[in-house]
Image: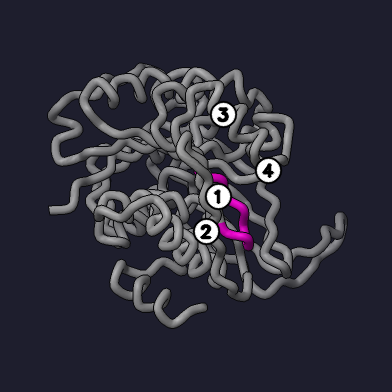
Amino acid sequence: MIPGVLTVGNIVVDILTRPVDEIQWGGTRWVESISPSLGGNGANTSAAIGKLGVPVRLLGAVGHDAFADMALARLSECGVDVSAIRRLASGTATTVALVKSDGTRAFLHQPGVGRLLFAEPISLTREMVSGFTRMHIGNPFAILHLRGFAPVLLQQAKALGLQTSLDTAWDALGEWMRVLGPSLPHTDILFANEDEALMLTGTHEHDKVWNFFRKHGTKTLVLKCGGRGCVIFREDGVQHVPAFEVEVVDTTGAGDCFAGAFLSALQRGCVLDEAARIANAVGALNVQSLGATTGLMDWDDTIEWMRNRP
């Protein structure tokens, strides 16, 4: 049996509006589509892991509203174990995503239950992690109390024998390394895109980014470079894995699904560069559809799609 991944992160309902190339205040602009979709770094990553046939359980929270029902239904449809998702007395986190014609986005976010989860810290137990060999945190910045609790969770996971990973995502509060720094010594794989890396390290130069994170305890860095693929940094060398060339519709969730696919491949026994190529494929599938998880395929169909692409 494939070992599972315990994921921790936010669950969001995205309201996707496309195309929005400019805003006309005081007027009305017609668009092609306005649609709700599963979102949130924790939810997107978990959906990718589950869709690719790897057991996954998500620790997160939703409210008591219709958005919560929709999010839980989509997660279950993707194969995610939702038994550890709490329903709290606030609205489900919601984001309005304005998507330009070229696929780039701007977000308006209402954190909802993201302000409440982990207000009372939890302790991981052997029962909670039974059948799981890895814990992943998707965006420690997105849940208010996770900003300080993430290092504790990672230490607990390591003490229970789990491998750990973390995807940085964007810090809307601008605290960056003050939040992330304490987690790095307890993180086996760090995922970050180039914009996030710039905000965290102060540089776009890849070798300097790696040196910065390495000095702060990072063991493996997977730097997401969008249409140029990704770069894997380790003490024993650097590997660049190029992307698949596709037409971009919407980049929402691509980085989360990339991370989920990368971890899924590792859980299936792939080495790092193989995992990166599969993650690039899932990212490419993702950006061809509107919505953070709409483009996901199962494992066999993903591998078949890769065989037919340059």
Q: Which label sits in the foreground, 4 or 1?
A: 1
Q: Secondary structure at mark 2?
A: strand
Whether the residues at callouts 4 and 2 have beta carbons within 8 Å, the answer is: no
> Looking at the rendered structure, which numbered label has been put on residue 188?
none
The quadrant in which residue 123 appears is top left
Write down the residue under mark 2: 241
Residues at discs 1 and 3 in contact (Cβ within 8 Å): no
The residue wearing badge 4 is 195
Between marks 3 and 4 in the image, the one whose residue lies nearer the viewer: 3
Residue in the foreground of this view, choosing between 124 and 111: 124
Instruction: Characterize the local packing of mark 3: few (<14), some (14-19) or many (20 or more) Cα atoms within 10 angstroms.
Output: many
Residue 84: name its quadrant.
Answer: top left
**Amino acid at circle 3:** Phe
- Residue lying at 47% horizontally and 34% vertically, measured from the top left: 235
Q: Secondary structure at mark 4?
A: helix
Q: Which residues are magenta?
A: 222-229
Label 4 neighbourhood size at 10 Å, few (<14), some (14-19), many (20+)? some
Q: Secondary structure at mark 3?
A: helix
Which mark sits nearer the N-terminus, 3 or 4?
A: 4
Per the rendering, the mark at residue 231 is 1
First in sequence: mark 4 vs mark 2: 4
Q: Say above or below: 275 vs 213.
A: below
Q: Residues within 10 Å of mark 2 (few under 14, many from 20)?
A: some
Residue 244's place in the image compared with 208, above or below, is below
Q: Earlier in the sequence, mark 4 or mark 1?
A: 4
Residue bearing the label numbered 3? 213
Q: CA distance from mark 2 to mark 1?
A: 6 Å
Tag 4: amino acid: Asp
Residue 96 location, x and y as percent?
62, 52
